[in-house]
Image: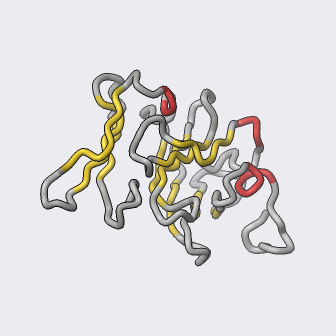
Amino acid sequence: DFLGLGHDQLMLINRGGVAGRVMILSWASGFPAIRYFESYGQDPSLNGWHDPEDAFLVGDFMGDGHDQVLFVNRGLGNGRILIADFSDGVQPITWRYYEAYSDGVLLNGWHDAGDLLLAGDFRDLGHDQVMFVNRGIGNGRLLITDFSGGNSNSASGTCNRSKHPRWCR
């Protein structure tokens, strides 16, 4: 539910670089209706965030009762993590969370091309977290990260080991 309408919509992301970039469709009326449309060149907010090597997940990462899109930039430009909110249905999109590669090292090695990223409420917090499964060597095997605080400290800056000993390394 990207738009907070109480039902799911379909989001299409075109990585081709021409024509439409993002479209959100709703079938609530029984027929497809475009509820959000963004062409390349209209809003630069997503430039570099959906290249072929990049990843994205959908979930209620901020605990707002509607879905956001978490973009993982696997290149070294534009940043590392972006949580984009499309709920107001207009451009520009709202950046709810942004993390540059220089903001911290906790996620280094956790989102490489062969790694697995999953969204879900793994810790029973009432909103989604991201499970990073490292399929390579080093850094451990599993990391669950909560981005709901909306700042880099909640996800990659510090982790309170006394409060969350199982989740902090």
- Is residue 36 left or right of 64 when viewed as pictured? left
Q: Residue at x 73, y 49 (%)?
A: 152
- Is residue 48 left or right of 147 when viewed as pictured? left
As displayed, is residue 70 above or below residue 59? above
Task: Find residue 111 and report its horizontal and vertical position in percent.
Answer: 59, 47
Q: Nearer the viewer, residue 121 or 118?
A: 121
Q: Nearer the viewer, residue 74 or 125?
A: 125
Task: Find residue 15 and report its horizontal and vertical position in percent.
Answer: 36, 32
Q: Residue at x 53, y 63 (%)?
A: 64
As displayed, is residue 167 above or below residue 9? below
Q: Residue at x 86, y 73 (%)?
A: 162
Determine if residue 53 is in view.
no
Task: Find residue 130 and report its horizontal and vertical position in percent.
Answer: 57, 60
Task: Find residue 47 and report its horizontal and vertical position in percent.
Answer: 49, 28
Q: Nearer the viewer, residue 5 or 73?
A: 5
- Is residue 9 left or right of 104 when viewed as pictured? left
As displayed, is residue 94 above or below residue 128? above
Q: Nearer the viewer, residue 110 or 129?
A: 129
Quadrant of image for the N terminus: bottom left
**Which residue lies most toward the left here?**
31
Q: Residue at x 55, y 68 (%)?
A: 127
